[in-house]
């Protein structure tokens, strides 16, 4: 795995020694492992750091206080090299309130060189010609368990050891393409990512397909969702391993039939199905829950205008695809689809759209003039 030493950081003093060494560098490669596939609520179980000399595996399960790491993450003089950083950033914010400055995301960088497959192993293969074994068992491991075996330690180390070399290779390619500034802007935006706590009161409404339920079905769903949440926390298992979203919806949609099925069972008062039955009863006997009203500004559009809007939208998507092929970039990188949808409305002005937060400065500089000309060509549609 190269000349890097693997150092297990399992005490507060070890952590301070690691921090001191990392602070002497202008970069650190980083990754983390969580237990969301096995435990609930999810938490971070391992943090991996790599410098030119060492790989550090920090164990937050053993170390009670890892707040000194916050100094590394917030230090803008140290670049944090991370692959597909969104999940990591949210986890750090959720578990410790850590904020990160100066991120280089190798997934974003690779996408701006024209890479289509953005998994770490695929990118390492494409850009560094490394063929690493991809073991799904390790990806789906329960990182809560201790001690970590040699295979998991190797897997965790492998996630960070090549990131600096990968970054250097990607930077050279981006400089040759004149796109490094684009990636720097995209990575700067990552600093704004925060973990968003779910709305516990209305979380059941996020179940896909819940819109088809009547008011009684929605009420039942709210109590079944609450039941699942309690069971998940009690068992320390993810909610989807208690009852899937699809099954929750099915139970709520056919509540009378499903309740009768449970009623006919010989239920143990201490058992899972008895508690499920009680959740049904609560949902059926409680006051009906009314869906929260979402204030939407309804704009009436004539049938002819809708046809013209769809036609303009199709033309705008064609414009985006043409540029994406020319630059060998994914269409989603060129311009946000939601923005094109807004621009398809004849009354929508480009100047207003350019002030939207979803439009990056590099996109404005590269494409706004061309887009303005293209929109003018659609004026008679």
Image: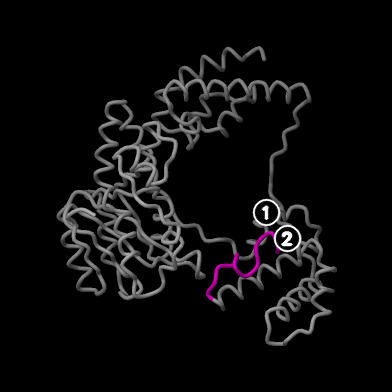
Question: Is residue 92 placed above or below 85 in the rendered structure?
Answer: below
Residue occupying the point 57% across, 34% down? 338
Residue 168 image-quadrant placement: top left
Percent position (x, y) of residue 352?
Answer: 53, 28
Residue 360: which disc? Answer: none
Tell me the SS state at disc 1: loop
Left or right placement of residue 62 versus residue 335 in this view: left
Residue 208: which disc? Answer: 1
Percent position (x, y) of residue 285?
Answer: 81, 74
Question: Is residue 221 placed above or below 315 in the rendered structure?
Answer: below
> Bounds of the magenta span?
236-248
CA gap between label 2 and label 1 equals: 8 Å
Quadrant including the C terminus: top right
* Residue 242: in magenta span: yes
Task: Please rate how many residues cluster around mark 2, counting C-alpha atoms within 10 Å: few if below 14, some from 14 to 19, many from 20.
Answer: many
Left or right placement of residue 368 versus residue 224 in this view: left
């Amino acid at each position: 795995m190269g000349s890097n030493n693997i150092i297990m950081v399992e005490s507060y003093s070890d952590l301070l020694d690691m921090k001191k060494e990392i602070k002497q560098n202008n970069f650190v490669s980083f990754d983390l492992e969580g237990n969301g596939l096995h435990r609930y609520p999810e938490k971070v179980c391992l943090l991996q750091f790599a410098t030119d000399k060492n790989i550090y595996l920090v164990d937050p399960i053993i170390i009670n206080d890892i707040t000194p790491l916050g100094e590394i993450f917030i230090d803008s003089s140290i670049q944090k090299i991370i692959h597909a950083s969104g999940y990591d950033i949210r986890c750090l914010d959720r578990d410790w309130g850590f904020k990160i400055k100066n991120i280089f995301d190798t997934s974003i960088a690779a996408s701006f060189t024209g890479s289509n497959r953005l998994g770490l192993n695929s990118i390492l293969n494409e850009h560094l010609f490394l063929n690493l074994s991809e073991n799904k068992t390790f990806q789906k491991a329960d990182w809560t368990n201790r001690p970590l075996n040699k295979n998991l330690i190797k897997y965790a180390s492998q996630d960070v050891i090549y990131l600096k070399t990968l970054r250097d290779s990607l930077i050279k390619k981006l400089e040759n393409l004149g796109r490094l500034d684009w990636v720097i802007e995209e990575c700067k935006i990552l600093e704004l990512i925060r973990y968003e706590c779910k709305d516990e009161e209305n979380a059941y409404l996020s179940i896909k397909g819940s819109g088809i339920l009547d008011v009684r079905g929605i009420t039942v769903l709210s109590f079944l969702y609450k039941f699942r949440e309690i069971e998940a926390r009690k068992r320390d298992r993810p909610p989807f391993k208690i009852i899937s979203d699809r099954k929750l919806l099915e139970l709520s949609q056919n509540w009378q039939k499903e309740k009768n099925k449970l009623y006919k069972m010989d239920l143990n008062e201490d058992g899972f199905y008895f508690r499920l039955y009680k959740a049904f009863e609560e949902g059926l006997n409680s006051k009906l829950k009314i869906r929260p009203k979402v204030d939407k500004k309804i704009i009436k559009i004539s049938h002819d205008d809708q046809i013209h809007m769809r036609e303009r939208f199709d033309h705008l998507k064609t414009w985006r695809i043409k540029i994406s092929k020319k630059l060998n970039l994914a269409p989603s990188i060129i311009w946000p689809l939601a923005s094109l949808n807004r621009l398809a409305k004849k009354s929508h002005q480009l100047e207003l759209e350019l002030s939207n937060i979803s439009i990056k400065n590099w996109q404005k500089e590269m494409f706004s003039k061309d887009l303005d000309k293209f929109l003018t060509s659609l004026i008679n549609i």
